[in-house]
Image (cartoon, helix red, strand yellow):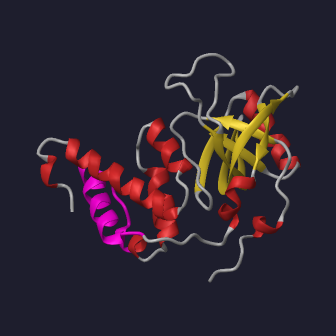
């Protein structure tokens, strides 16, 4: 068993900056690169770097959000800034997923970005070193190979097949080009086993929907 991740021993904050992005998924222990250029989110990164380095990724609840502050889903995932670089007037950062949260209320800020009071309590298992649960790896990987081949995308399957169930499911759930609703469902899955089943189902549905896809199921 791997040791606990370093953030698991640190207290989680009572308020959290929010970065709303449609169709973007961050999961615990996942890595998410981001290109930050809008002023309010440059402010957000500056403040996070000066504090606990945590940013809450969350999706707007509208399929096509409008306005400066669109309504949001209640559940998101916090990530800690693991790398930071400046590129002209942009910031290039990478978040490592720490824990999901539920927004209990939003709080006022003078820095233009949004901030919320998170409830961490339902997601204590996210801080574990890894997750457990039955994952049908042959079925999932078999479907993923067809799915990526169909889209002309290259994956290092040898490396992926050698990784843990948690890393496999987390990485594939984050990078597969599913829609916002599917991404939110993957985020809200109760545990690794449920997320793996949902991911497998989404991949197989996508294969069945392609022309001549009736034989995609394993």
Q: Assign the N terminus to one quadrant of the image.
A: bottom right
Please say whether residue 214 is one of the residues in the magenta stretch.
Answer: no
Q: Residue at x 57, y 29 (%)?
A: 61
Question: Taking 116 as reference, is 197 left or right?
Answer: left
Residue ranking furthest to the left: 212
Q: As rendered, which of 38 and 139 lies closer to the eye?
A: 139
Q: Is residue 141 above or below residue 25?
A: below
Q: Main secondary structure of the magenta part?
A: helix
Q: As rendered, which of 30 and 39 lies closer to the eye?
A: 30
Question: Taking 130 as reference, is 169 left or right?
Answer: left
Q: As rendered, which of 103 and 144 lies closer to the eye?
A: 103
Image-quadrant location for residue 66: top right
Q: As rendered, which of 60 and 161 lies closer to the eye?
A: 60
Residue ranking furthest to the bottom: 1
Q: Residue at x 88, y 25 (%)?
A: 110
Please say whether residue 149 is one of the residues in the magenta stretch.
Answer: yes
Q: Is residue 170 above or below residue 138?
A: above
Report the number of discs.
0
- Where's residue 34, x and y in %? 62, 44
Q: Residue at x 52, y 53 (%)?
A: 189
Q: Which residues are magenta?
A: 135-158
Q: Is residue 151 visible?
A: no
- Where's residue 58, x and y in %? 63, 39
Q: Is residue 41 above or below residue 204?
A: above
- Where's residue 76, x and y in %? 64, 44
Q: Is residue 85 visible?
A: yes
Image-quadrant location for residue 114: top right
Q: Residue at x 57, y 69 (%)?
A: 131
Q: Assign the C terminus to one quadrant of the image.
A: bottom left
Residue ranking furthest to the top: 67
- Where's residue 136, x and y in %? 36, 69
């Amino acid at each position: 068993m791997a040791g606990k991740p370093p953030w698991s021993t640190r207290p989680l904050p009572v308020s959290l900056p929010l970065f709303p992005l449609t169709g973007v998924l961050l999961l615990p222990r996942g890595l998410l690169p981001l290109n930050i250029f809008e002023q309010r989110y440059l402010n957000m990164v500056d403040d996070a770097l000066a504090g606990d380095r945590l940013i809450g990724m969350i999706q707007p609840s509208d399929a096509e959000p409008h306005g400066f502050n669109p309504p949001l889903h209640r559940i998101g995932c916090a990530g800690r800034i693991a790398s930071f670089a400046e590129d002209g007037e942009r910031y290039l950062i990478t978040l490592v997923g720490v824990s999901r949260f539920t927004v209990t209320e939003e709080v006022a800020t003078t820095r233009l970005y949004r901030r919320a009071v998170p409830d961490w309590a339902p997601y204590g298992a996210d801080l574990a070193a890894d997750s457990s649960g039955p994952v049908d790896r042959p079925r999932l990987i078999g479907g993923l190979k067809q799915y990526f081949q169909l889209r002309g995308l290259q994956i290092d399957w040898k490396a992926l097949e050698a990784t843990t169930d948690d890393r496999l499911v987390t990485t594939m759930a984050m990078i597969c080009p599913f829609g916002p609703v599917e991404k939110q469902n993957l985020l809200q899955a109760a545990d690794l086993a449920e997320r793996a089943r949902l991911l497998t189902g989404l991949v197989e549905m996508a294969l069945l929907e392609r022309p001549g896809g009736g034989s995609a199921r394993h």
